[in-house]
Amino acid sequence: MYKPKPIDTKDIKLPEELLALTEKIAENVHDVWAQGRISDGWTYGEIKDPGKKTTPLLIPYDELPDSEKAYDRNTALETLKLIVKLGYSIKKSE
């Protein structure tokens, strides 16, 4: 049985500028996901129907329900924290 073992990043405190980056990454995560779905023939639909390839989530990020935004934000936040935990640094070029 599969048992996920994500790297523990609870000890990582991101600087404010990286926390601000989280939202932009979350929006991009959604856009990449949506682009992939559209490329696979999915369209907007009121209900998710894998057979018809419809989903109500094919909308702009800012129109998503908070629960969906939270999922994308968590993905972005944990990715940034993992990068730092592994010893990498992220610096915005001047």
Image (cartoon, rainbow, N blue to C red):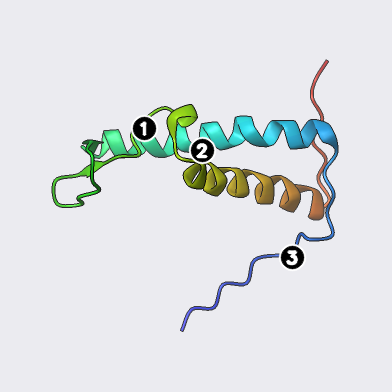
The image's mark for residue 29 is 2
Q: Residue furthest top?
A: 94
User: Which comes before the other along the chain, label 1 or label 3?
Assistant: 3
Q: Nearer the viewer, residue 65 or 86?
A: 65
Q: Secondary structure at mark 3?
A: loop
The image's mark for residue 78 is none
The image's mark for residue 35 is 1
User: Where residue 79 appears, x then y in whole percent?
Assistant: 66, 48
* Residue type (three-letter) at the residue carrying disc 1: Gln
Residue to which mark 3 is pinned: 8
Report the Cα–Cα distance between label 1 and label 2: 10 Å
Relative to 22, 60 lies left or right: left
User: Which comes before the other along the chain, label 2 or label 3?
Assistant: 3
Relative to 6, 53 lies left or right: left
- Does residue 54 sit above or below 94 in this rendering? below
Q: Residues within 10 Å of mark 3 (few under 14, many from 20)?
A: few
**Residue at x 74% of width, y 65% of height:** 8
Report the Cα–Cα distance between label 2 and label 3: 22 Å
User: Where residue 76 appears, x then y in whole percent?
Assistant: 62, 43
Q: Secondary structure at mark 1?
A: helix
Image quarter of the C terminus: top right
